[in-house]
Image (cartoon, rainbow, N blue to C red):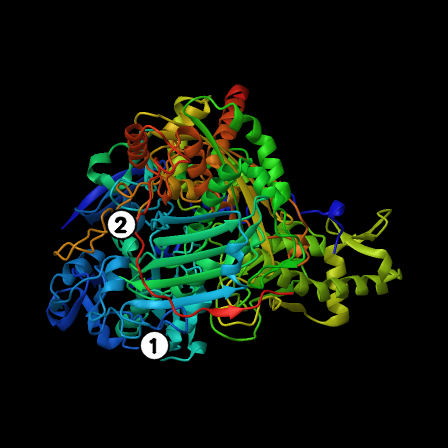
Amino acid sequence: MNKKENFQWIGKSWTQVGGLAKAKGETVYADDIFLPRMLYAKMLGSPHAHALIKSIDVSPALERPGVIAAITGKDLPVPYGILPVSQDETALCVDKVRMVGDPVAAVAAIDEETAEAALEDIVVEYEPLPSILSIEEGLAEEKVQIHQYAAQGNIHKKVALEFGDTESGFSQADHLREELFYYEGSTHLPLEQHSAVAQLGSNNRLTLWSSTQTPHYVHRTLSKVLEMPASRIRVIATPVGGGFGGKTDPFQHEIVVCKLAMLSGRPVKLTLTREEVFYTHRGRHPVLMWVRAGIKSDGSITALHFRNFLDGGAYGSYGVASTFYTGALQTVTYPIANYKFEAMRVFTNKAPCGPKRGHGTPQPRFALEVLLDKFSEDLGVNPAELRLRHLVPSNSKTVNHLTVTTNGLDECIRKVTLASKFGMKRKNMLPEKGIGLACSSYLSGAGLPIYWNKMPHSGVQIKIDRGGGVTVFCGSVDIGQGSDSILAGIVAEELGIHLQHVIIVTADTDLTPVDLGSYSSRVTLMTGNAAIEAVKPLREQILSAASEVLKIEVEDLTIKNDKISLKDGSRELTTFVEAVQWAETKYGTLGSVGSYTPPRHGGDYKGSGVGPSPNYSYSACVAEVSCDSESGWYSVDKIWIAHDIGQAINEKLVIGQVEGSVYMGLGEAMMEEQVYRPGKSDIGGLHKNPSMLDYKSPTSLDMPEIETILVETNDPEGPYGAKEAGQGPLLPIMPAIANAIYNAVGVRVDEVPITPEKIYKGLQNIKSAKKAKNGEIGRIGPTKFPDVVFPEPVYVEPPQ
Amino acid sequence: MKQLLTLQINNETYEFWASIHKTLLEVLREDLRLTGTKHGCELGECGACTVLINGEPILSCLILPVEVQGKEIMTIEGLAQPDKQGSDCKAHPLQTAFAKEGASQCGYCSPGMLMTAKALLDKNSNPDRKEIREALSGNLCRCTGYAKIVEAVEQAAEQVRELTATL
């Protein structure tokens, strides 16, 4: 591996692989695929939030001219789900519907209009059931169950873990706080609607093109549900037009198009409408949190206790993992001596929640960082100072047995407060202006795969053509985060060649070795390490063949700028292409593989599988806001964010990921809400705003200036020391804004989104109560918490 | 029912039969296979389907092709101009700037964003940041936070000014 100062590509900013094709409109997304004789499919969604299916008759639809095939749940009865513990979905509902929009039947026709019209021909008889539309209703309703496999009533999953002795921790504290927080759900809103095309070839092999972040998991699911050997199925992930976690599950439409293609013998396309995308969801879980925390007067945390209720929606999805994630990563920023975590995920008759950028961690992070802001006021300490005093050290284990290899938070906080003049501004802020700080951490890839196995998480295969072209095969999916660029850059760096000689072939189960997919911020670290391993033997072969021909010791040779040259840089000896041909002459066809499996870093208690990662990224954010003290109307004026990236592989793309995370965090902080109509009426469970106009997201006019600072910690686990960039920088945005609003007008909004309306109410409360004390009077947030008994926790001794 | 349409797209004449209810977006993508133009909502909310009609940015999902017969339609496929000196199809400065600055992440909003930006630069080759943000406010992007997009438009504007100066 080259030394840092000699890097040709790493840490530089080169143009994204495929960037110009995207700007020229040449990139072929799933819905851009048109095949001869292709049919168009549509699915019929349930109008009820919760109902039994008494009967379905698709025969009238089949009579309509132009309709070629129609199917119901009976044609695809095998259950599936992304997690082995939650196999609770079917491609089309079999005997009951669990949410509005739950698909019950599908048709394929010669054009989209005919398919759409044919849906109206289908006769479905429902028997409505009482619907469950909130956490409270889910906890209260024992008899009417959304899923019978639930842990109890409609409680999907219960978790209770205790690390150390929290009661004794609380007794050692000088300050105690008990707080309630609420974090509203939000959705990914990718610009591209989900789309899939399937074709059964005359060789009896099925091909699915789909806009998916996880072709490998889709491949497994298709094999299971269609009851076909995986070797007869090819899944190709098309370039993903925005994912953010929303295209990480195997989906109904992906299975439906396959079945319809098999039945009709023709290619079939199904693109979801925007409304269907809102119901497909798998986005941020709404989470209600109760937090108890104790600190000493020096600010050290003696004990922390989180109790979370997650509103899961109608299906399991990643929900069990999400539930654990609402407890796993609180510990990796500041040392927590004793920690207790309890959570319940509740099924409700709404679109299923799952992983959205930050997966399960933005909610507790919001609570923790606002809580620290309150503590800093209790202690009369600057919030930055409070955090800097107590940071999880590098090379340590947290109370819940997570291994922290490097923690760059110290530098992040120092740089972001310096750049924003945080300390000075807090003392001398103008009226109606506020400044807030928050920090966070995220994993660079989950330490464990979704289904239990000991195989690699990422595989890379390389072949070198005798013309000098280097083709890299990998199952990873570029969802816009730049994973193709990372792969190309790393291979070019390791081989000492120009990027233009590297050809990237990804995300095709026929051609590429398995990579688990673009989720959990795993790709740079895992495919990067696999790529480095794959290059190694090829580089050795090329140099050894060159050494033999040139009669120069192999130790004295290197490859740089497409040339074989002396290591001391004094002479270029031959071209890379010629050396490749010498190597092929000596060794035969040039090819190699590399794979990566994360180290086993976690504890060995039940539930320890969620949280471990090869390394953790860290972020610190300062937000500056202006807030009208009459109306509560506010704007975010500037965001400063420092991110511990370990080592940037492509600096410009990293900054792009940070800016995109800030943007998405701002949307959640200020406006985004995935909400439904309440009540038991006919419209209960209807999405309130399933359109891009009504679901508010920030436009170019809403975005403040963002100043990004990259901090490099050179982590031993990452390729060249790299960590993740795509998710972590979202996490501190919401609490930084909440803390800034409090700093501006004295209103604590202990829930997300932080809307002007809520601030206005807080301002009214302050006015009527006259005396605001520590923000308690101007507080807006949840006031009630369900009184539910949690199971006895699993006690885990903290690491020695 | 179908109708005969004659459309001027990217300086070429297309004469074809299409269903009367189809929007310009559908005709472009499905009948002419000009799939560079994208759709995110088909309700006029996201801006992904923006094309230029006589130089004005128009949402192709909200317009019928009959309305634009006889007008100049430009889609993303027409933004790169053939190089008169050589055989290369030259990318527009906006396209090179988008690629170079990382203004396309997933790239799905890019065609619409680029057409809107092109209309802006044609009218004002020296826009300030506020004017750029204003012009692009109808085009949603979920990846970039708009930062790199605004930078790319600024950079392209500079190039456009240089190119105009050398003509």
Q: Which mark is residue A675?
A: 2
Q: Secondary structure at mark 2?
A: loop
Residue at image point 74% right, 71% down: A587
Q: Where's residue A564, x and y in %? A: 79, 54
Question: Can residue B119 be seen by looking at this rendering?
Answer: no
Residue at image point 53% right, 64% down: A163
Identify whether A88 is placed above or below A181.
below
Say which quadrant the C terminus of chain A sits in.
Answer: bottom right
User: Which residue in the structure is indicated by mark 1?
Assistant: A226
Residue at image point 31% right, 46% down: A673
Q: CA distance from mark 2 to mark 1?
A: 34 Å
Residue at image point 68% right, 51% down: A714
Identify whether B112 is placed above or below A420.
below
Out of A264 and A329, give the one closest to the viewer. A329
Out of B76 and A128, give the one closest to the viewer. A128
View extreme (top): residue: B165
Residue A738 sits in which quadrant? top left
Identify whether A714 is placed above or below B137.
below
Neighbour class for label 1 at 10 Å: few (<14), some, many (≥20)? Answer: some
Q: Mark 2 is on which residue type?
A: Val
Residue A774 sits in which quadrant? top left
Neighbour class for label 2 at 10 Å: few (<14), some, many (≥20)? Answer: many
Question: Can residue A444 be seen by looking at this rendering?
Answer: yes
Q: Where's residue A533, x and y in %? A: 67, 64
Question: Label 1 is found on which chain of the structure?
Answer: A
Q: Where's residue A788, x and y in %? A: 32, 63
Q: Where's residue B65, x and y in %? A: 23, 40
